[in-house]
Amino acid sequence: YPGMPGSPVRRPIVIERPDTAPTTVFARPLTDSELRDVLTRLRTPSVGPQMSAINELAHTQKGTNAEIESSLLDLLTNSDWPLRQQSAAALGVWGTEKSLGPLILLLDDRMFSVRWAAIDALAKIKDPRAITPLAKHMASDEETMQASTALKSFGPAAEKEVVPLLKNEHDQVRFEACRLLGAIGTSNSVQAL
């Protein structure tokens, strides 16, 4: 587990300069040897090594590795919700378009923290096909703020899906849609506002 002696977890270092915005820098990417070790731990039946490996993957530089992604995708269906949550978070770093469908399915997970991790991962992967499911999730009045933040990361590309939310039955959804369009909207949404 993270924080235990001998844990290989890499923590980000935040560098702040007075003249620029804070920058997050990671110590270094995983080496091939470390990737093999992480894969071995991901594939064990024991939760401890799996969580350690997932946490390590979630805190590295963005990477692509089909075996890593496949192993993380397998863990999304685990009965242990912390594994699902952390795997979704790690897919925000290691996921590709292959992860899109399984992450969208997690928007209906019974645990809110798993849904939040899936929302964040979809925003980080930035596949425009995630916009519609994120907008539908926002319309359900569940995790409205998280879905809005994710949609904001897509910029004006999300506008078309956000405009109908101005007529949603839930006050919070309408308010957040208005706020979101203030940030990402173009002249196309002025009339709807």
Image (cartoon, rainbow, N blue to C red):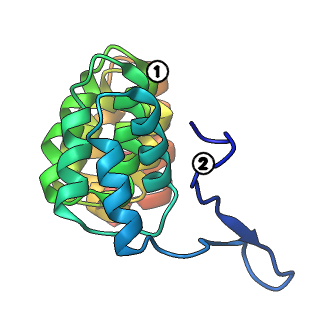
Look at the image and tell me in which quarter the C terminus lies.
top left
Label 2 sits on a secondary structure element that is loop
Q: Would you identify the image quadrant in which residue 30 lies? A: bottom left
Q: Residue at x 46, y 52 (%)?
A: 58
Please tell me in which quadrant of the rendered image residue 155 appears.
bottom left
Say which amino acid is labelled 1.
Asp
175 w.r.t. 156: above or below: above
Q: Is residue 58 rendered to the left or right of residue 104?
A: right
> Tag 2 or tag 1, which sits nearer the N-term?
2
Quadrant showing the N terminus: top right
Check disc 2: other Cα within 10 Å, few if <14, some if 14-19, many if 20+.
Answer: few
Farthest residue toward the bottom? 19
Residue holding disc 2: 7
How far apart marks 1 and 2 lie (CA) works out to 46 Å
Task: Name the secondary structure under disc 1.
Answer: helix
Q: Nearer the viewer, residue 175 or 126?
A: 126
Q: Mark 1–mark 2 contact, CB under 8 Å?
A: no
Q: Residue at x 25, y 55 (%)?
A: 68
Indicate the position of residue 73 as horizontal and vertical percent values.
Answer: 21, 42
Name the front one of labels 1 and 2: 2
Q: Which residue is mark 1?
A: 171
What residue do we see at 18% from left, 57% from top?
67
